[in-house]
Every structure is written in structure tokens, then in C-alpha cells.
Amino acid sequence: MAHIPTPRGPRVEPARHSLMPAAPLPYPAQGFASFGEFYPYYLGEHRDATCRRLHVVGTGLVIATALAALLVAGWVALLIPLFGYGFAWVGHFRFEHNRPATFKHPLYSLMGDFVMFKDVLTGRIRW
């Protein structure tokens, strides 16, 4: 990515990923009416690059494990929660220092994992 010089000296990298909020978003008192309302909050809870990377790796392993369970042996599906939650929770507790959204919104959080995975793969969110 190219750097843009600023008038006062240091080079600043332009913000090219508008999906990622600059700061965590507050949790709304009324909750979320839709996944569309939830996803910006979800992204605000994943601002740390290492946390996002762990989520992407974990989600990729979940997909690969689900395929292996279908094609090779069904018992392999038992590893899905380990990969899905294990990588994500390490990211939250060790790097992001927040509580995973899974605890309050398990379905939206699961959906968020897969949408963020897609957004990282398509370049909409920085790896």
C-alpha cells in the first residue's frame, strides 16, 4: 500500500477499509434488531489485527474440518468447536482484551465470523 506524505513530516497510511470502526462501538441498550445492525458492533470488537487473524484461521479450519467430516469421517466434526471457539477466544482474551460477542449473541456472532472471513478474503477488511 502506498503511503501519503503529510505536510508536517511523517508518512501516514491512508484508511482504505471503511468497514472497520476506529473505536469499539457502544452496546445498544435495546439490543440489535438485525444482523446488519450487529455487524458494525462485531467489527468494533475485532479491531486488533492478531485477533482478526486468529478468527480467520479458526473459521478456515472450521470450514476445512466440516468438509473433512463430510468426506472422510464424521467424528472429525467434534473438532469444529475447538477450532471455532479456541482461536477466537484466544484472540479476544489475549489480544483484544474483551469478551467475545458469542456470549450475548451466539447466532449473530457465528454469522459475523463467516462474514468477516469473507470480508478479509475479499480485501474489504485488512488481514
Image: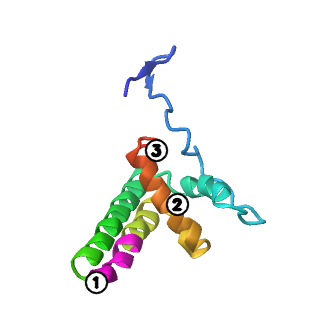
| Magenta-colored stretch includes residue 8 | no
- 124 and 86: which one is in front? 124
Q: Residue at x 46, y 65 (%)?
A: 92
Which circle marks residue 74 in the picture? 1
Residue 118 seen = yes
Which circle marks residue 63 in the picture? none
Q: Is residue 19 left or right of residue 60?
A: right
Sequence-wise, the earlier of marks 3 and 2 is 2
Which residue is under mark 2? 112
Calculate the distance from the C-alpha at mark 1 to the C-alpha at mark 2.
26 Å
Q: Quadrant of the N terminus?
A: top left
In the picture, residue 58 is in which quadrant? bottom left
Residue 127 seen = no
Residue 68 appears at what percent x and percent y? 25, 73
* Badge 1 element: helix
Q: Is residue 36 left or right of residue 18?
A: right
Which residue extends farthest left?
72
Q: Mark 3 against mark 1, which lies toward the viewer? A: 1
Calculate the distance from the C-alpha at mark 3 to the C-alpha at mark 2.
13 Å
Q: Mark 1 against mark 2, which lies toward the viewer? A: 1
Calculate the distance from the C-alpha at mark 3 to the C-alpha at mark 1.
33 Å
